[in-house]
Image (cartoon, helix red, strand yellow):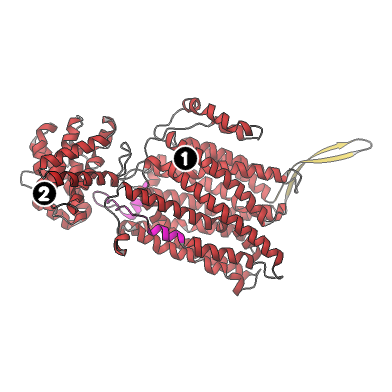
Amino acid sequence: MGLRESFSPKPTISDQDVASGLRWLTWEGTAAMGFFSITTSGFLAAYALVLGCNNFQIGILAALPFLTQPLQILVIPLVERFRRRKVITLASWIPAQLSWLPIALIPLFLDVPSSSAVALLLITIGIRGLFASVTSCAWNSWQRDLVPQQVLGRFYARRQMWANLAAMAFGLAASFFVTYWEGYAPAGSEALGYTFPLLFGAVFLGLASPLFMSLMPEPLMQPSPGPQPSLFSTISTPFRDGNYRHLLSFLFLWGLALNMSIPFFAVYMLLRVGLPLSAVMGFSILSQAFNILFLRVWGPLADRFGIKAILSVSVSLYLLVVLGWTFTTMPERHFLTIPLLAILHILAGVAAAGVTLAIGTIGLKLAPKGQATAYLAAAGLATSLGAGLGPLLGGYLGDFFSARQLSLVFSWIDPTHFIQLPTFSLIGFDFVFCITFILGIFTLSALVALREEGEASREVVLDALLAPMRHAVRPMSSVPGLNFLSQFPYSILRRVPIPGLDVALGVTAYQLADMAKTTTVAAARGHRKVSTIAKALEKALTSVWGTEKDMRTHASEVAQQTARGTMHAKENTDLDVGHLAHSAVLGIARTFGRARIVPQEALRGAGYGLVQGAGETGADLGRATINAVEAAREVAEQAGLSEEEAAAYVAQGALDAAAAMGDQAVAQVEASLPEDVLPADLAEQEKWPP
């Protein structure tokens, strides 16, 4: 495969392509997370302290990557127009990863600690955020079309598991190196202990991520039928969707609340508790270990039961963890500090596994067909704004409360004794943790208002989960909060709406098209008759459908992708475009007719897919339209329509597809239509797809 072909989108994706893509996607996540373990954790916070950052500047450091993410809204037109997500992703991700090199080299060129070192760190992180925002928009859309929905939860759980293992190994090694360096390095060169792990990670892990990306196939981005909406209309649509607005509110408030505290956990342990960096990273490794263990639980449960309830429970547990940090000092380190920190990191790993997995997939599930890029960008915007403002607010409040203290003291006074025992004390970031907990409680109201298709009652799923969960947590039942895991409510995950995806069949649009292409090629090698190829398509399509209800719900998508894939068989056979178009319409119409499904949407979908596939393969659009209309007349009686009606529905789908391709395509299709075919007669009916 040439370099140009490897960077070109593929109109059809086979099972082998999907398997290869998922394998490289796993490797990419492993490399990226291995490096992120030190660039998004206590390691970077400790480096910032060495360079001279105060609490508010550390808040800015944590906020910058999120505050630049809303710029991906401006990237949507680029992705929609250029439609080469792999090229856009790599062109922005490589410089984003290379930006860590000047960050690592700051101690070699500037005095530390100093204001100039802090300024260079913040400026470079900001520039990196600009590149990363471009990457996010194209990368999310690319992943979404590549990963089959029926394994969504399990795949990302497995990918996250391997990524966390890499993060544990590299993060622990980097922290031990810094501790070793500080013990033996000359005075004044402590900052160089951070330089070497950053350089190693940027070169060997940071650049490995785009390398693995380049080996992943990119499915052809499906065009939206009909005229394209304006940028303002595209961006504003998710905010006009009432249910999705609840999700956006939750994502903003949760990002704001949680990121008021999380970026400062490492600072708290380093400065307030007085732990060395190796101990801080050790606790992080402990949390990641339990994150891995519970990803194996959350992933299959998300595929089986749903997302919203898992998110609700894991968010509640996370809030209890944040509140628990206020008890690690009373007001200073005490004999229970280390055991309590261990418990909190264990629970944080459990909760983070559910939160990360659920937030990463619920936006996919609730995004309507054909509008995924805008909806996911809106979700990213809400998350980024909250996560960007959170550290700024947390850093400001941390500095504000650093000189303030609230204490509750138990006193005993008698004629001979005076005893005071501190029972509760808040100072500095303790106030921030309490505020995070209170704000987090309010975020749950937005989650309660969210509606997920197929929600099950708490009682229904408890019967299935209560017994095994009790067995799982019984060894840890003495730990406060862990027995809460046995009371999970869940909801049933049934559909993840993705454009061009027949979720009832459990295959992506590209796999469905590949099935049609493979079937047509195989049938054409044996017999070249239209009836033979049509029968083969009918048999193959019947073998992959679910229930008649499923087929009826997704009739237009199934017909479109089947017809589209059939046209791609032209690349592997010497059959002309008319032969293929005729065969596709016959096979699709007979399949739907046998299932006693109203044929109008199937005929429209077939017409759309034939012209779409013809355009993708450089075939004659007019020839495809003519033969599709002839085939529609042939099956009209079986479909319960007049010949004129059947032909008009196919013609309408063909015109809709041509409209998405441009005026020249519309002219070709219109010129090929017989005079007695008047798709304008259908103008009062809803345009395809419904």
Q: Quadrant of the N terminus?
A: bottom left
Image coords of residue 376 (percent x, y): 40, 49
Is 131 left, or right, of 118 in this rendering?
A: left
Amino acid type, mark 2 = Gly
Q: Is residue 209 placed above or below 301 in the rendered structure?
A: below
Q: Nearer the viewer, residue 152 or 667?
A: 152
Q: Nearer the viewer, residue 247 or 454?
A: 454
Q: Which residues are magenta?
A: 208-237
Q: Nearer the viewer, residue 255 or 204?
A: 204
232 magenta-colored: yes
Given the current orientation, which residue lies at the most extreme left position?
675
Q: How many marks can you see?
A: 2
Q: Which residue is mark 1?
A: 299
Is 469 left, or right, of 614 in this rendering?
A: right
Q: Quadrant of residue 527?
A: top left
Q: SS of the residue at dot 2?
A: helix
Q: Residue at x 39, y 64 (%)?
A: 91
Amino acid type, mark 1 = Gly
Image coords of residue 417 (percent x, y): 91, 38
Image coords of residue 463 (percent x, y): 49, 25
Is 339 left, or right, of 24 in this rendering?
A: right
Residue 464 appears anywhere in the view: yes
Are there few (<14), some (14-19), or many (20+) residues within 10 Å of tag 2?
many
Q: SS of the residue at dot 1?
A: helix
310 magenta-colored: no
